[in-house]
Image (cartoon, grey):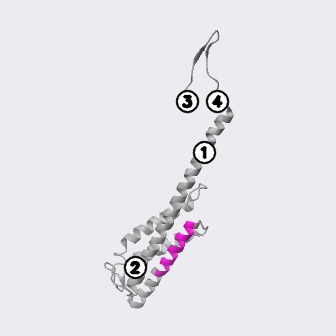
Amino acid sequence: MDCLDVSLDTGRGLTAPEAPSRQALEAQAMTKSSFSRIFTFERAGMIRRTAAILLALHGVIHLIGFVSSWRIATLEGFAYRTIVLNGALNVGDAGVRVIGLAWLGLTFGFLAAGYGVWREKPWTVSVTGVLAIVSLIVCVLGLPETAAGVAIDAAIVAAVGYVAFRKTSVSVW
């Protein structure tokens, strides 16, 4: 009962109706908290699965760096070049191939991170953080073509930091 129902009792004055029983209040509280727990659990699962898919897609996109640096395919906007750091350093063909191997390793790493997030593996947060930092470094080497990757990796680092340091026990990963 949300409001006080006042009624007139003969001879005694104003009286309030009986309060709901403790069992009724506990049942109502349990229903609300059960719903909240289920909703929170479902929402956390949805966030976790979305994060897993996005990490896996991020990994697949890293194939662009491998394919272009090894001249397997020519992709518009990602030409083969031996100059890195926005034109500041020439690493030669061998250097570009090493960077290409880093792109390939990041592909498999982010695919594994996506799997780990999906399956709630305990190693996922730390591995994803390391991958994002390495990816950020490789993206900086590939500037200006990889500017979007820099922003995405920064967002991943921020998300990993949030998950690693928050104090609640609800698991998003």
Disc 2 + disc 3, Cβ < 8 Å: no
**Label 4 – label 1 distance at C-alpha:** 19 Å
Quarter of the image where the C terminus is located = bottom right
Which residue position holds label 1? 33
Q: Is residue 136 above or below residue 32?
A: below
Name the residue type under label 3. Answer: Asp
Which range of residues does the magenta coloring cover?
Answer: 104-118
Quarter location, residue 137: bottom left
The residue under the point 38% across, 89% down is 92
Residue type at mark 4: give it. Pro
Check disc 4: other Cα within 10 Å, few if <14, some if 14-19, many if 20+. Answer: few
In reply to whether residue 2 is colored magenta, the answer given is no
Label 2 sits on a secondary structure element that is: helix
Per the model, the C-alpha gap separating discs 3 and 1 is 19 Å
Query: Between tags 1 and 2, which lies in front?
Result: 1
Q: Residues within 10 Å of mark 1 (few under 14, many from 20)?
A: few
Q: Nearer the viewer, residue 79 or 89?
A: 79
Position of residue 152 in the picture relative to residue 34 (left or right): left
Q: Is residue 2 visible?
A: yes
Residue 20: % across, % down = 64, 30
Residue 59 x, y percent position in the rendering = 46, 74
